[in-house]
Image: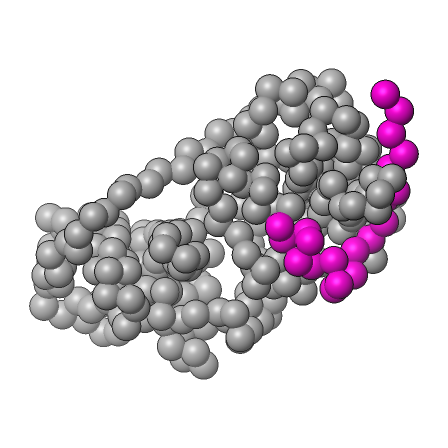
């Protein structure tokens, strides 16, 4: 069957439709979404909508595909593609992938540097085969861990001289940023964001500092971070890490560890509805 697709760049009026499409994909592939309109608009604020974001419409002008390309430095670009479940297997995914590859080639030409195009491994076998045909190979797997908590845990007992509190705007930006960079510096394929762009995200109305936890030592120095966000009734721990100086060498916390207290504090606040 032949299909007539129209590929264009979206505008703000498309945001709700695109958001619903992504949510439909999340439910189909993972059972529940971790996305909302605020997250989409925040993502779009970081992208060039006229160059790196696309939607695909069918003959009835219905949006059935959505994709974006995130530039990470001069040598890497990460693509994200979503196809409405009812339109899968009709060529929408192929059209998106061709668009990603063409844009990546354009960026490589403009910079004079070869651009490595990455894509997240999809859940469906048909999508995996499509990527394989285009030369993609799996190089890294990530697992999402979850726990269903039916009752509040007992409050964590934090050792004396050691505190965990929440992120304070116009105070913690530099120390938390540096902790983030240090703890993830040796992570596979990590690209450090510029401080200015990282700080801008903490100044947005959608940012909730009550879900960013900072572990501090006796002198107020940052020991570790847990950067979380709430989506409906689910708490997502997006990044959690401990600075090297605090990994198992401080006697006051050696028996349990900074990560443990960060996780316990996050869970405690989750049941309490935040601070």
Residue farthest along the front direction in this orientation: 60
Using residue 219 as the reference point, say whether residue 160 is left or right of it: left
Q: Does the magenta run of residues contain 14?
A: yes
- Residue positioned 40% across, 71% down in the render: 209
Q: Does the magenta run of residues contain 32?
A: no
Using residue 55 as the reference point, say whether residue 77 is left or right of it: left
**Residue bounds of the magenta highlight:** 1-20
Q: Position of residue 79 (x, y in %)?
A: 68, 41
Nearest the viewer among 166 and 58 is 58
Q: With respect to residue 89, does 246 lie above or below?
A: below
Residue 182 appears in the rendering: no
Quadrant of the rendered image containing residue 96: top right
Q: Position of residue 253 (x, y in %)?
A: 14, 55
- Residue positioned 48% across, 29% down in the render: 141
- Residue positioned 69% across, 53% down in the render: 17
Residue 91 appears in the rendering: yes
Using residue 172 as the reference point, say whether residue 249 is left or right of it: left
**Scheme by which the image is coloured:** one colour
Q: Position of residue 16 (x, y in %)?
A: 66, 58
Q: Quadrant of the C terminus?
A: bottom left
Using residue 163 as the reference point, say whether residue 167 is left or right of it: right
Nearest the viewer among 149 and 75 is 149
Q: With respect to residue 210, does 246 lie above or below?
A: above
Disc tally is 0
Residue farthest along the bottom direction in this orientation: 170
Q: Position of residue 249 (x, y in %)?
A: 19, 51
Nearest the viewer among 64 and 126 is 64
Q: With respect to residue 266, does 206 lie above or below?
A: below
Quadrant of the rendered image containing residue 216: bottom left
- Residue positioned 35% across, 38% down in the render: 145
Q: Quadrant of the N terminus?
A: top right
């Amino acid at each position: 069957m032949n299909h007539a697709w129209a590929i264009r760049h979206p505008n703000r009026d498309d945001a709700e439709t695109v958001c619903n499409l992504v949510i439909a994909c999340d439910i189909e592939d993972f059972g529940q979404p971790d996305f909302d309109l605020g997250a989409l608009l925040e993502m779009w604020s970081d992208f060039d909508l006229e160059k790196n974001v696309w939607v695909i419409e069918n003959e009835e002008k219905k949006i059935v595909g959505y994709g974006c390309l995130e530039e990470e430095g001069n040598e890497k670009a990460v693509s994200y593609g979503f196809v409405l479940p009812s339109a899968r297997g009709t060529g929408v995914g192929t059209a998106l992938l061709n668009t990603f590859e063409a844009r990546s080639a354009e960026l490589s030409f403009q910079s004079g540097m070869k651009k490595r195009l990455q894509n997240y491994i999809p859940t469906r076998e048909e999508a995996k085969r499509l990527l394989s045909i285009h030369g993609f190979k799996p190089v890294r797997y990530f697992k999402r861990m979850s726990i269903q908590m039916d009752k509040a845990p007992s409050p964590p007992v934090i050792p004396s001289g050691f505190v965990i509190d929440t992120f304070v705007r116009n105070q913690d930006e530099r120390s938390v940023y540096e902790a983030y960079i240090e703890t993830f510096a040796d992570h596979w394929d990590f690209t450090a964001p510029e401080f200015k762009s990282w700080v801008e995200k903490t100044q947005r109305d959608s940012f909730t500092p009550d879900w960013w936890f900072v572990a501090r030592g006796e002198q107020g120095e940052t020991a570790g971070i847990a950067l979380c966000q709430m989506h409906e009734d689910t708490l997502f721990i997006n990044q959690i890490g401990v600075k090297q100086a605090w990994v198992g060498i401080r006697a006051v916390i050696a028996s349990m560890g900074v990560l443990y207290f960060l996780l316990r504090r996050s869970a405690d606040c989750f049941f309490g509805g935040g601070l």
